[in-house]
Image (tube, rainbow, N blue to C red):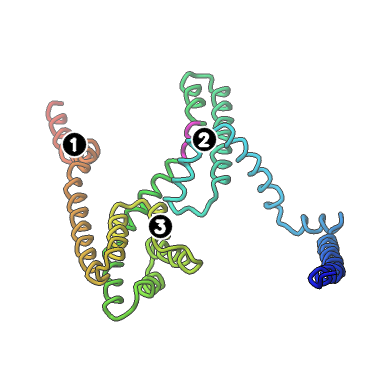
């Protein structure tokens, strides 16, 4: 018999005990894991675990889940996607499910109040209010989120020039771009500093810089920040010095901020004219002309 056949048979025979040992160890470990998971998970322990939660958690969380599922079924998919996008841009800490539950709860509560008012009053105006009230309750959170998103975008636009100045100083002082971002995020305040801190977290966990920057753009949706990020990506691609790019971008963003302030100042007289005509001038006329009118009326008497 050839020797390689003997060696092959011997190898097969010796591998059988190793195979049996590995299988037995795997079964023992799986049994141990199942025993650890099932240990102490009885009915009494589950009841104690549930009772350890607060009363609001035991009542409000299941109710919120039910309302959120109902609101998701009633809302079109495009509306849900738009609401999720608005939450992301607004930087809200509330999850989508909670906002959907609040929308449905407000709509139902105002509908009940409107119907009670309509039944008590019995007029056409109360019936119209019963129709409009649930719409206000349901779409009110959308309006609040839209205003928060606009305010957050404006804050990021206003903070961008100062942040770029700080980045420029740090880079010209010898720090790398990531180190400059970390220092700016640590010393800064506001939504832009929070976004930079989240950008650094993405970079630390291994996300490529281009993907992390694009993710920050998706979370903010600010045109000025988008322009800055695209310029940084192009500078890294073509090997342009970051310090020159930062200095140029800081000057440009500061000029844009001045233009926005001048634009708002030019719009102010147009916005003030309607309150002045309908609110201030009538009161002024009453204060100035009322004594003269009273004197004239007394003279005629």
Q: Residue furthest front?
A: 1
Mark 3 neighbour class, 10 Å CA radius: few under 14, some 14 to 19, many 20 or more: many
- 257 or 122, which is in the foreground? 257
**Measuring 25% from the left and 71% from the top, which residue is drawn there?**
241
Position of residue 48 in the picture relative to residue 125 (left or right): right
**Residue that carries the numbered disc 3 in the rendered image:** 216
Residue 110 pos. (x, y %): 54, 33
Residue 67 is drawn in which quadrant?
top right
Q: Do we see residue 40 in this rendering?
A: no
**Residue that carries the numbered disc 2 in the rendered image:** 77
Q: Secondary structure at mark 3?
A: helix
Q: CA distance from mark 1 to mark 3?
A: 61 Å
Q: Is residue 138 magenta?
A: yes
Q: CA distance from mark 1 to mark 2?
A: 60 Å
Image position of 7 with respect to 300: above or below: below
Q: Is residue 295 magenta?
A: no
Magenta stretch: give its range: 135-140
- 233 or 124, which is in the foreground? 233
Q: Secondary structure at mark 1?
A: helix
The nearer-to-camera label among 1 and 3 is 3
Residue 2 pos. (x, y %): 82, 70
Image position of 156 with respect to 60: above or below: below
Residue 261 pos. (x, y %): 21, 54
**Measuring 27% from the left and 60% from the top, which residue is drawn there?**
231
Q: Secondary structure at mark 2?
A: helix
Mark 2 neighbour class, 10 Å CA radius: few under 14, some 14 to 19, many 20 or more: few
Number of marks in the rendered image: 3
- N-terminal of the pair, mark 2 or mark 3, is 2
């Amino acid at each position: 018999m050839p020797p390689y056949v003997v060696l092959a048979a011997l190898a097969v025979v010796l591998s059988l005990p190793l195979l049996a040992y590995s299988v037995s160890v795997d079964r023992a470990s799986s049994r141990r894991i199942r025993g650890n998971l099932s240990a102490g998970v009885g009915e009494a322990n589950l009841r104690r675990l549930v009772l350890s939660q607060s009363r609001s958690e035991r009542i409000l969380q299941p109710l919120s889940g039910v309302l959120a599922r109902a609101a998701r079924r009633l809302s079109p998919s495009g509306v849900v996607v738009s609401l999720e996008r608005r939450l992301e841009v607004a930087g809200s800490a509330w999850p989508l499910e909670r906002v959907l539950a609040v929308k449905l709860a407000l709509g139902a509560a105002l509908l009940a109040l409107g119907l009670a008012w309509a039944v008590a009053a019995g007029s056409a105006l109360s019936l119209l209010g019963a129709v409009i009230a649930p719409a206000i309750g349901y779409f009110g959170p959308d309006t609040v989120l839209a205003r928060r998103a606009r305010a957050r975008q404006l804050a990021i636009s206003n903070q961008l020039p100062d942040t770029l100045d700080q980045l420029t100083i740090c880079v010209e002082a010898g720090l790398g771009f990531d180190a400059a971002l970390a220092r700016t995020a640590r010393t800064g305040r506001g939504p832009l500093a929070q976004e930079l801190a989240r950008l650094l977290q993405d970079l630390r966990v291994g996300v490529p810089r281009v993907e992390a920057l694009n993710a920050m753009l998706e979370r903010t949706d600010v045109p000025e920040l988008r322009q800055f990020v695209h310029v940084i990506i192009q500078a890294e691609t073509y090997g342009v010095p970051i310090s020159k790019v930062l200095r140029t971008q800081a000057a440009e963003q500061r000029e844009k901020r001045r233009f926005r302030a001048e634009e708002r100042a030019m719009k102010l007289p147009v916005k003030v004219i309607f309150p002045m005509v309908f609110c201030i001038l009538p009161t002024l006329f009453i204060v100035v002309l009322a004594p003269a009118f009273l004197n004239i009326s007394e003279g005629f008497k």
